[in-house]
Amino acid sequence: MAKKAMVQRELKRRRLSRRHEKARDEMKARLKDRELPLEERFVITMKLAKMPRNSSKTRLHNRCELTGRPKGYYRKLKISRIALRELGGSGQIPGMVKSSW
């Protein structure tokens, strides 16, 4: 089980990212416009830099929804490999059986 503080920090980052997503995307689109004068693009860059760092999508990290584990994460199932093994072994995932040969 991951530390509760780490899981809460990740949730906070997700909320911030969603809240600032539209403004951040608009600023980035305006920065790519080469028709704007250099001074105006510099002002936009400074506004973008003043936004909270945790509102950036690149700061997000996938975590298991059951345990909060950050490593060994299956995107399709949104759980870690360890949680997947436990659920699969107990028969809670349809179609998944413990392999033996």
Image: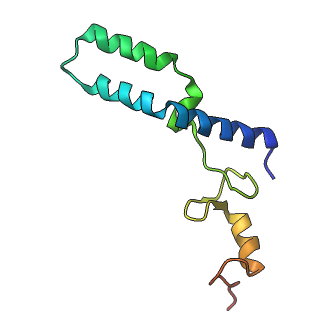
- Left or right: where 72 falls relative to 40: right
x, y percent for residue 35: 18, 19
Foreground: 32 or 23?
Answer: 23
x, y percent for residue 83: 73, 65
Foreground: 18 or 5?
Answer: 18
Instruction: Name the image quarter holding residue 90.
Output: bottom right
Pick out the residue farthest to the left: 35
x, y percent for residue 26: 36, 28
Q: Residue at x 81, y 44 (%)?
A: 3
Instruction: Name the image quarter holding residue 81.
Output: bottom right
Q: Residue at x 34, y 12 (%)?
A: 42
Q: Residue at x 47, y 34 (%)?
A: 21
Instruction: Name the image quarter holding residue 15.
Output: top right
Q: Residue at x 60, y 65 (%)?
A: 77
- Left or right: where 30 falls relative to 83: left
Residue 52, relative to residue 69: is it above or below?
A: above
Q: Quadrant of the C terminus?
A: bottom right
